[in-house]
Amino acid sequence: MQMASMRSRRRGVPGTIAGALLLVWLPERGLALMLAAVVLGGVVLAALGWQPHPRRRVLATAGAASGLLGTATSIGGPPMALVLSGPENARVRSNMSAFFLVGSLMSLAALAATGNLHRDIAFAFVALIPAVVIGYAASRYVNRLLDAPRLRTVSIVVSTLGAIALIGQQFALL
């Protein structure tokens, strides 16, 4: 894994811990809706042209936000995807699968430590491993088709869909 990606993942550790603690302290529905609103706010800013430069502080913030969102709601990708969708980040983007694998394992450990790792979460993690492998293999071909502007559009759309799915999931539980 490249050093920048590994440093970003380490910066996600505080967010992962915070996400697990938020699950303990706050009602799940309220937390999920609040974090979905934060993601949608970031999407609106990105759609309006906001593109933070991936400097140390920005990567630290995005890594922490990714850890928090991933642990608390399972949609940890948007912060890192929005920051790393710029044209100068092609090398870092190539390691996003490893970033999210490590982040997912950290989230599972944090959920287990706080008593929030349920059987269905562990089963879903294992069941989705083949999809991750297929996605990684397909990325070699898809990356050739996605220049920076297209990747940015895909990042915004996928982030929006993740937030909307999270909101829909919360209302389906009513």
Image (cartoon, helix red, strand yellow):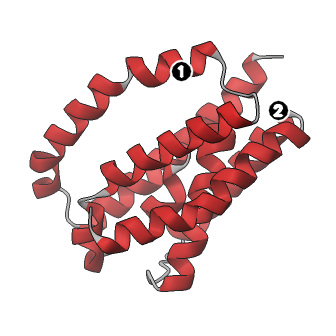
Q: Nearer the viewer, residue 46 or 92?
A: 92
Residue 152 against residue 76 in the figure, above or below: below
Q: Nearer the viewer, residue 33 or 93?
A: 93
Q: Which residue is mark 1?
A: 122
- Disc 1 residue type? Ala
Residue 47 against residue 29 in the figure, above or below: below
- Disc 2 residue type? Arg
Task: Inspect this view and state whether residue 90 appears.
Answer: yes
Q: Position of residue 108 (x, y in %)?
A: 57, 35
Q: Residue at x 27, y 61 (%)?
A: 1
Residue 13 against residue 134 in the figure, above or below: below
Image quadrant holding the C terminus, namely: top right
Q: CA distance from mark 2 to mark 1?
A: 20 Å
Instruction: Give the label on residue 29, or none.
Output: 2
Q: Closer to the N terminus: mark 2 or mark 1?
A: 2
Q: Residue at x 74, y 54 (%)?
A: 18
Determine crowd level at label 1: few under 14, some 14-19, many 20+ residues with C-alpha closer than 10 A: few
Q: Position of residue 170 (x, y in %)?
A: 75, 27
Q: Position of residue 128 (x, y in %)?
A: 38, 23
Q: Residue at x 14, y 39 (%)?
A: 137
Relative to 34, 12 lies left or right? left
Q: Position of residue 21 (x, y in %)?
A: 80, 46
The kind of secondary structure element at disc 1 is helix
